[in-house]
Image (cartoon, rainbow, N blue to C red):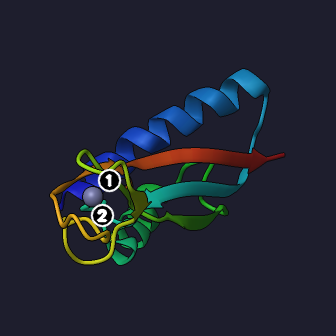
Amino acid sequence: MHGLAWMEETLGEITTVAEHCGLRTITKVTLCRGQLSHHFPEELELAWDLVKQGTICEQAVLVIEEEPALVSCSACGWEGQWHSELACCQACASRVELVSGTDLQLVDIQGI
Ligand SMILES: [Zn+2]
């Protein structure tokens, strides 16, 4: 259950920012999840419910935004959204490289 470890670390980051900004209660936390991240939304929500208990984030809503995975082809320069295969959508059919879409990031927190 690696989502839990990630969430615990993120909660630490949120707490540090909240202290720095003088926030006493966090109301909303937004994450950006790449389409190919190995952390699944259900897993993250479950982990969030566990780690926020008894913290300044107890009342916070978790929002998970999805970021599409992008690939680029080294042979023809084509760039586009990843679908199901790591092959170029253009005629060259070369292997493409992942440009983005594997990350999971904390992008925003709101509090009072
Ligand atoms: Zn290509």
The yes-or-no answer for disc 2 within 8 Å of ligand 1 is no
Q: Quadrant of the N terminus?
A: bottom left
| CA separation in Å, label 2 and label 1 | 5 Å
Mark 2 vs 1: CB contact within 8 A: yes
Camera-side residue of 104 and 95: 95
| Extreme-top residue of the structure | 20
Seen in the picture, residue 91 relative to 112 is either above or below; the reply is below
Q: Which residue is mark 2?
A: 36
Marking on residue 70: none
Tell me: 2 left or right of 30.
Answer: left
Sort mark 2 into few (<14), some (14-19) or many (20+) by Cα contacts within 10 Å: some
Residue at the image point whose x is 37% and y is 45% from the top: 8
Sort mark 1 into few (<14), some (14-19) or many (20+) by Cα contacts within 10 Å: some
Q: Position of residue 43 (x, y in %)?
A: 32, 71
Mark 2 or mark 1: name the one nearer the start of the chain: 2
Q: Quadrant of residue 96?
A: bottom left
Residue type marked 1: Thr
Residue at the image point whose x is 56% and y is 65% from the top: 65
Q: How many marks?
A: 2
Residue at the image point whose x is 48% and y is 43% from the top: 11
Camera-side residue of 96 and 1: 96
Residue type marked 2: Leu
Residue at the image point whose x is 16% and y is 59% from the top: 94
Q: Position of residue 86 (x, y in %)?
A: 19, 65
Marking on residue 102: 1
Q: Position of residue 82 (x, y in %)?
A: 34, 68
| Extreme-right residue of the structure | 112
Q: Quadrant of residue 48?
A: bottom left
The yes-or-no answer for disc 1 within 8 Å of ligand 1 is no
Tell me: 23 left or right of 19.
Answer: right
Q: Position of residue 10 (x, y in %)?
A: 44, 42
